[in-house]
Each structure stands twice: as structure tokens, then as C-alpha cells.
Amino acid sequence: MDRALCIHGHFYQPPREDPWLGRILPEGSAAPAVHWNERICRESYAPMARARRQDGAGRIVELFNCYSHMSFNAGPTLMSWMARSAPDTYARILEADRESLARLGHGNALAQIYHHVIMPLATERDKRLEVAWAVDDFKARFGRDPEGMWLSETAVDTPTLEALAQAGIRFTILAPSQATAISDNGRDWRGVDAGSLDIRRPYAVRLPSGREIAVFFYHGPLSQAVAFENLLADGEHFFRRLSESAGGGLLSLATDGETYGHHFKFGEMALAYALDKAKSGRDGLTLTNFAAYLAANPPKAYAKIREASAWSCAHGVERWRSDCGCTAGDHPGYNQRWRAPLRNALDLLKSRLDSHYDAKAGALFKAPEAALDAYGQVLAGTQSKEGFERLHMAPSADAVRRGAAWKLLSMQAWGLASFASCAWFFDEISRLEPVNAMTFALRAVELARATGMADPEPEILTILAQARSNEPAMGSGADIWETMARPRRETPKTLITQALVTLALENRLPLGGEEAAATWPGVAVTVRLENAPAGAPRPGAAAIVYRHETAADRYELTYTPAPTANPFAACAAIRPATGGVEEGFAFEAVGLPVNKRQALADAFSRHHAEVFHAENLAAAAVARSLVTERQEAQNTLTLAPLVLHLWPGLLWLEVFEPPLPPKKRELLHLFLKHTGDGSPVKAALEARIAVEAARLIELPDPDWRLLARLTRHAAELGLHPDWWAAQNALWQRRPFTGPARELAEALGFAV
């Protein structure tokens, strides 16, 4: 009997990047991580790429790549961040698709709607762009055409399926409640609901264009149990539930990637256990993915979908435009009447942006719609700016007109980003997600104004004023736009301020006419400064270049250093290089929002942590060489309080260097252990040791004895580094033989 199993994971984070800097700024709610992408990646996405499989004694027997044995989609906004900031996990995801493609003939990866917009609420153009850009992104990452595409919140209507089919997508995945009728011949229909629908086979949906697209309906109760019923508490119990439910076709689940590890600690281990058992064929189960199953089992029946419906809203798609009662949050008594004004304001803005594009693009592009579709290749990195200009921009376009063309394209992208579904999903308009949506909209407005559009803000704010926060102090949506979104807007003053503060904090301010750059993914600011007497104004120049624009904005610059240690006590004056009025400003008065000031503080902390470590090691090496033998009744170093600041360096050397003679070592260890109790820098030192151990393991010819010694010394000194990255690096060097065997045992492997 056919007992096929497919577990799907939806891996997604909304666009979080600051639309000027192109970098995710600190998000306080994600503490202790800097932002939510970083936190969820460490808690869920990264562990799933190397899930620990353990024996009965708790020793690691395998690092299991869950992505290799499950269906998954990973959204473009998450994957673009991961490629820069979590390259190891990113590589494991790509590797998993290649492995599954070789094993099954079809890869595990599905594409995903680009900005995670609710497709039934999108215009025809926006539907087309969300699909086209998603296809471009997928092809750039996975090196093949996508066969399936995940719809945000499984939100669907017939025009959405038309957009998928037109782009060559063969299937999508829906909730069982989204089917209304089925037919064996496409003529005789019988009504179904979530309880009566046979979810074990794919269905074809006939479209008005004459095309067809396949639809899989996942197992609702089991998918819900993974998310909400603690099914991941025990891997064996999870597998048994899967086995009991399988048979006679395809058992498919749709799950949120955050479930594994973030919502349920060690959930990835339960998933890895179940996938491993299914992989081995236990109970006659066969692991597959949707594309492979579809190729072997083309639809033999037809389905009609529930129009404008989604898995997470019992009222269709009202969750993203009205106070329908569906919400996520922990605030009893809150209402979501703010959803409609927020939707209406952004819909109005997007209609204005579209009209502006249509009015301006004809003179700038050979074919405006084709250029807009192809912009996804620029976003994906498969088309250079120069190549795009040759293919799509009008031959007569000079540098100014090309700059306007790039602004129009970026305007459309940020306009689309403002519709990411998370803005309406939760229970309060002043949350991070709606504020991000307003920030993206603000950036789109700025680009529209820069290309000649009449200011749409007064209309937008009039509508947003109708959205009332559940927190009286926050006021209306218009207040939130003014107090939380608008301060994020970058200007030449704010960018040059951040550049100069960054260079000052990192001791990189240029001298004697040299240049130095502060660079973010979305923009770079290059500064040139001349010499001047200490504290005197320093003349120079600054240039600002945005990533997807070709021309630099240039300024004459005068920089006056801060007279105190506070870099914001500095000031500057700028004048456009093309001429104009000079504008002076104090950095304190620029009004950077808290997340951008925190980002600067974080950059300072990282830089000076490295400087301090190097200086501390150098002094500690001298201090360590001067340690004497322990004398009678002595229980710590002489004048120990004066060397407390050297504790990190002394400990580092004691972990990594060969041991001192026994009597000297005994005295030093007494000091180190006593000082280490409750040390505020202990956690940071443990993290640094763990990173260094992983780096040493990844060397072409590791010093295995040094590595075994450092793990032993760390344990002796009461340190408990998280060896996760070191374990990952060591696993790549199997089998464990010789000196590597001792290290493997010390790191928790079964050898």
C-alpha cells in the first residue's frame, strides 16, 4: 500500500531591512539577539540544518540536515539576509535541494511569493510582480526553475492561481478548508469541507485562461498538532502519529519553520527523528516531496477553491483588512479596527505610485512593464545594473534620466514591501511590523517625490488618522507615522552623520586627504578629510551612493570633531558639490532614531571588543610569565585586585597555551576560578573561545592535540562554551581517528 509522507516547512521572515541602509537594525523585542532574523535563525533555521541525533546516553551520533528530507519554501526576504549573515545555514539549505533533486528527481525547495503579500488583496500587476520576482530569486539561488510556489498564509483566489500558472508554476499547497467541491471528471461536482475532503491526492484546478494548476491539500489536524499540541515533545510519539495517519496516498503536513526550536525547544530533534525513521522505511513509509509525488501521480480529479480564503482566517482574508476577530497577541480587549485604515492608506498610496510609474516610465524604458518584471533579476543579482540599462532603458537616457528610472523601480519595490502580511497579522498598529510597513511606504513616497510626483502624504495621513492604537499614548496611525516611521528617514545629513560617527568610533577617520567609507548593504558614504589642528574644523568632501542607483550625490564637507568622548558632540556643514547654500548641523540635533543610535553603539562595542581583546592578551602574556610558585598559605596572586582586568586574557592563554609548571599553574588557577565566579565578561569569553575552536577545526591541517587540550582546559577552569559551531565543523571531518577522536569525545560525539 502506498504510504507516502511529505512534511512541508514554511521558512519566512518579513522584510526587516531599513529601506535606506539595507541593513536590519536592532529590534528590542528580539533580545538577547540583535533582531528577529538573527534570533529565529539561531533557534530554528540553523539547528534544522544540523539537527542532533543522539544515542541512549545522549551522545551525538549524527548531524541531520532536515531540509534534505522535507519539502520547504524559504522566502526571498529571509534568504537574502541569510546569504549575507548566516552563510553556513544558507549553504546547507541549497545543498539540501541539490541532494533531494539527485535522490528524487525533483528538489525539495518551493518558491514563495516575494514579499509575502496577501495575493487576493493585490492588484493584477502586483500579483504578477510578486510571482515573477519570486521566480527570479529562486532561480538565482537554487539554479533551477521552481515547480511549486507557496502562497502567503495560503491566501488564494482564481486570479492568483492564474498568475502562478502563467509563470510556469505547476502546483501550490492549500489548507483543506479552502476546497469547496471536487469532481472526478470536471463536470459532476460534489461539495466538500475540511472533514470530508480526501487530502491524499493532488487535484487539478481549471482556470478561465484554459490553463490548469495542481493543488495539494495538507492534513489539517496533524499540522495543527505540530504547531499547538506539543507533538514535538517526543520524536517517537511524533513518528507514531505520522505512521498511524499515513496510507493509501500522500500524507502531507504544512508547518511553520519557527515551530522547530523557537516555539518548541529541541523541536528540530523530534523532526529529525521522525524524518530519519521515515527515511529508513520504518512501517513502510516513503519520504517524498510534492513535485516528485505529482510527477508520479498526476491529478485524476478536479477541485474548486474557496475564493479569497486563507488558512489562518476563518473569514476569508479579512484578517488583513478588517477587525474580523482573528488575531495573534496577548492583549485581551484589544481591537483591530486599525487594520482597515492601514490597508486603505497603503492601497491608496500604491495606486498613486502605479499611476506615477505609468506616467513617467514610457520616456525612460523601452517597455515599462517588461522592465518592471525584469527588475527582479537585478534584485536577485543575476543581472548587472549596466546590463539592465542596456536591455531596458531608453537609448537616449542620460545619467539623470537613468537615475530617475532606477528610483521608479525602487519605488515600486518598496511600495510592494509595505504590504507584507505581518503588518496586519497581530493585534496592535504600533508593533514593529506595521511600523515597518509604514517605513517602507515612506521610502516609496520619497522616491516618488524625487521623480516628480505630487506629495501623497497628506491623503495618506488623513486615512491613517482613522486608525486608533490600542495604546492611548500612541495615538493614531498618523501619529505613529510621524513619531515612529518618519524619524527613520535618511537624509544627506543623517547619512553623513552616521558615516562620520562610525569612522570615529572605529578609529578610521581619514587623514591628509585620504578617503574612508562607511558601508551598508543599501548605501555607501565615502568621506575625504584634510588635516587640521587638533579640534579645528577639517575640510573635505562626502559622496553618497545607493546600491541600485548609478550616480553619487556629492557634497563639500567640513567636519568639526567632538570636544568630548561623545562622538555625537561633533558637528558638520555640507553644501552640494553642484553649488548651493551651506547647511551646518550638530550631530546631536540630527535626531537619529533609537535603533540607528543603537546600531552605532553596537558597531563601537564590536570594534573595541576586538581592540580590548588584543591589548588584554598582550598584557596577560607578560603577567602569566611572571606568575610565581604558590607559597605557604597563599590562595591567590599577590596584588590580585590590580590584575583583575587581565582575567579574560589570562584565562584565554591558560585555555589555548601549553600549561605552566604545576605550582605556578595551581596558583594561577586559584585566581582564575575565584575571579570567574559571577564575572560579567565570562559569557563573552566563552563565546569567543567557541568561535576560535570552530575556526581552528576548519583549518586545512588542524592541530588536534591543541584542540583537545583547549576543551579540557576550558572544563577545568569552569568554562562552558557552546560548542555547537565546533561540533558542526568537526562533523565535516568524519571519521574521527587518531587525535581527532579525543576531541570528538570531548565535544559530545559517540565515538
Image (cartoon, rainbow, N blue to C red):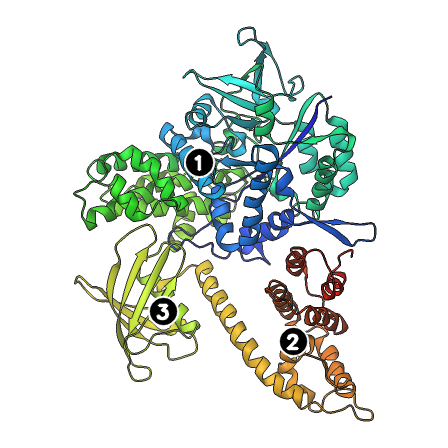
Q: Which mark is residue 309?
A: none
Identify the residue position indicated by label 1 in the image.
135
The kind of residue on which mark 1 rests is Val
How far is disc 1 from disc 3 in space, using C-alphas?
A: 40 Å
Up/down of 455 relative to 182, above or below? below
Determine whether 370 is above or below 439 in the image. above
Query: In the image, what residue occupies the spot 73% across and 31% down?
Result: 242
Query: Do tag 2 and tag 1 residues touch (Cβ < 8 Å)?
Result: no
Q: Is residue 552 visible?
A: yes
Three-letter amino acid code of the residue under disc 2: Trp
Residue drawn at x 72%, y 26% as measured from the top left: 246
Q: Tell me which residue sits at (50%, 26%) in the image.
A: 170
Is residue 355 something that shows in the picture? no
- Residue 652 disc label: 2
617 vs 573, left or right, is: right
Residue 192 percent coordinates (x, y)? 62, 15
On screen, 26 above or below 668? above
Q: Is residue 396 left or right of residue 594?
A: left
Which residue occupies the foreground of this view, 507 or 302? 302
Quadrant in the picture for residue 195: top right
Q: CA separation, marks 2 and 1?
A: 49 Å
Q: Residues within 10 Å of mark 3 (few under 14, many from 20)?
A: many
Q: Residue at x 71, y 36 (%)?
A: 279
Instruction: Tell me residue 659's x, y (percent).
Output: 72, 81
Residue 414 picture location, percent across and down = 37, 43
Name the residue tied to disc 3: 500
Looking at the rendered structure, the secondary structure element under dot 2 is: helix
- In which quadrant of the rendered view does residue 293 lie? top right
